[in-house]
Each structure stands twice: as structure tokens, then as C-alpha cells.
Image: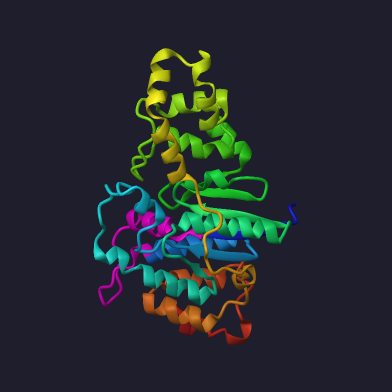
Amino acid sequence: MSDKKKFLIIDGNALVHRAYHALPPLSTKEGKLVNAVYGFTSVLIKILKDLGPAYAAVAFDTAAPTFRHKEFKEYKAQRVKKPQEFYDQFPLVKEVLEAFGIPALEKEGYEADDIIATVCRKNEEADKNIENIILTGDLDTLQLVGGKTKVLSFKKGISETILYDEAKIKEVFGLEPGQMIDYKALRGDPSDNIPGVKGVGEVTAKDLLRKFGSIKGIYRNLSKGEIRDKMREILEKSKETAEHSKRLVTLVKDAPVDFKMENAKLQKYDTEKLSSVFGKLEFHSLLKRIFESNEFQRLDSKNLTKQGNLF
């Protein structure tokens, strides 16, 4: 059994987005839509139970444009704005986190993934016994996987997950974690509007990286006759685009986010806060799961309300 202390860090936007689309509309008696909050909270309870982390934090995007938007105006420009009832659930998610004593981290100009990358780096430098577990809905953070960091990603909806370590990335993609940046830069990413190199798909990108290691290695060997003429022409014309795409997909590991590891240490849960927030959201079944779960030994027994008053 590993003696490492687990640090759970969640991509808040990715999980809220997944929950919103995975669950049918759920509303309180007052008509407030809470399906994304419910899904987020349900996953949070399960992951805390299954992983038993010593620390936890959640990273969020902000509404402000990031350095990527400023550098490349087409970045994520194709995304359709969601209904206001989706965005209205974020403050409620943060209320749930506050009740658990889990910090919500965000910084204007940076994305949640940049905050995650920064936190993981800081954790690795601060404590050799830390193991970062990133919970996310996409694969952008696979570039962070290493000896102290793993990615737990959703396969389908919010119920099935897959854990990526170095071996799993090698098995699924045939690449090393450090090559995932170049892989995305070469093939592009329609969901983020990353252009990539036109004419280079997933298979070709993998083949090139297995042979030459990186985008830099590809262009270093471009004139040596090891790449067929048509592909060489494509790559020659797209060098600037490939390098620009790589800058866009590379996560920032020194975002100026206000973060201290000790603030993310999970303490005794405040049962009064949990009861109040869950009652307001009418999450009675989730509250019952918390109080009946063996993992939630962090519940402050001094403040436990009689079960009959909770549900």
C-alpha cells in the first residue's frame, strides 16, 4: 500500500459541465435549477469516499479572457454560450465546497487547467510524499502525468472513470505524458479551436512523435529525407502554426494563484454547515449518503444533529 498522501484537485468547470449535461433538469421547490450542483456534489462525495484524500481543492475558470484569448482571438470562439441557468449554478457549487471546507481556486487570465498545473507543481516541490490526483472531464491535463501526478478522467457521463498514469497513457496513446502537448498541437483540437497542422490527424501525429520525439525533433529532421514528400511539404508550410498551437496547449505551471497546501487539508466537516446548505438545495438523499458513509469520519460528532431532523 502506498504511503503517499493524496491531494485531490478537481477541474470544477469540467465537472459542472459534465453534470449539467448528464442529468435531467432537477429543480428545488422554488424552481431553481440544481442538476449540475447535484451531479457535482454526488461525484465529490463518491470521490472523497473512494480516494480518502488528505487534501482537496477545486479549480475554476473565470469569465475574464485568458492570455490564450488575447494571443489567439479564435481560441474557443466557436463555443456556444449556455443558458443563464447553467452559470447560475456555479455560486451554489462553491457554497457546497465551502460547507466541506474545500477551497475554490481561480485567477483572472488563467484557466482551471493552469491552476491545476501550478498546484500540482507546488505540491510536488513541497512534499515528496504527495500524490496529486486530478479529476477532470477532458484530457488536457494528461501532459502533467508523472511519478507524483495521475489523472482521473470521465469515460462516460459522470459515472465511469479511467485512471491515467504513465503506463496507461502509453497503452492508450502509445506516447509518453510529455508528448501529449505536441500530440494535441499537431492534430489540433476542435473543442478549443486549436488549429493544429492541417493534414496531420491522430495517427500521423502519433507516428511522427514516436519517431522524432517532439515537434522540435520533427522539424530538426525535416530535411533528412525521413518524412515522405507530401507530408514534409505540409509540415514545412505549417511550422509556425504547429509552434503556436503548442504554446496555446501548454499548461502554465506558475500561475499567480493564491494557494497554500495547508489551506486544502481536509479537516472535521462542519455538520451544521453541511445540513444547512444541503437543506437549502433539497439534497436530502446526498446528505443521508454523507452521514451514513464510513469515509466521513471527519464529521464533527459534537455538532451532529439528530438524524430525524436531517432527512
Q: Magenta includes 162?
A: no
Asked if residue 261 lies left or right of residue 239, the reply is right
- Percent across and percent down for residue 149 are 62, 50
Tally the numbered discs. 0
146 over 258 or under it: above or below: above
Rendered residue at 50%/36% (across/down): 182
Q: Front-most of 47 and 249? A: 249
Is residue 151 visible in the rendered structure shown here? yes
Is residue 139 visible in the rendered structure shown here? no
Q: How is the image coloured?
A: rainbow
107 over 189 or under it: above or below: below
Asked which quadrant contains residue 240, the reply is top left
- Quadrant location of the C terminus in the rendered image: bottom left
Rendered residue at 34%/44% (across/down): 191
- Percent across and percent down for residue 208 are 50, 24
151 over 43 or under it: above or below: above
Q: Front-most of 185 and 123? A: 185
Rendered residue at 40%/55% (across/down): 67
Q: Front-most of 239 and 251? A: 239
Asked if residue 282 lies left or right of residue 257, the reply is left
- Percent across and percent down for residue 48 are 57, 63
Rendered residue at 43%/19% (across/down): 232
Q: Magenta includes 19?
A: yes
- Percent across and percent down for residue 114 are 49, 55
63 over 210 or under it: above or below: below
Q: Which residues are magenta?
A: 10-36
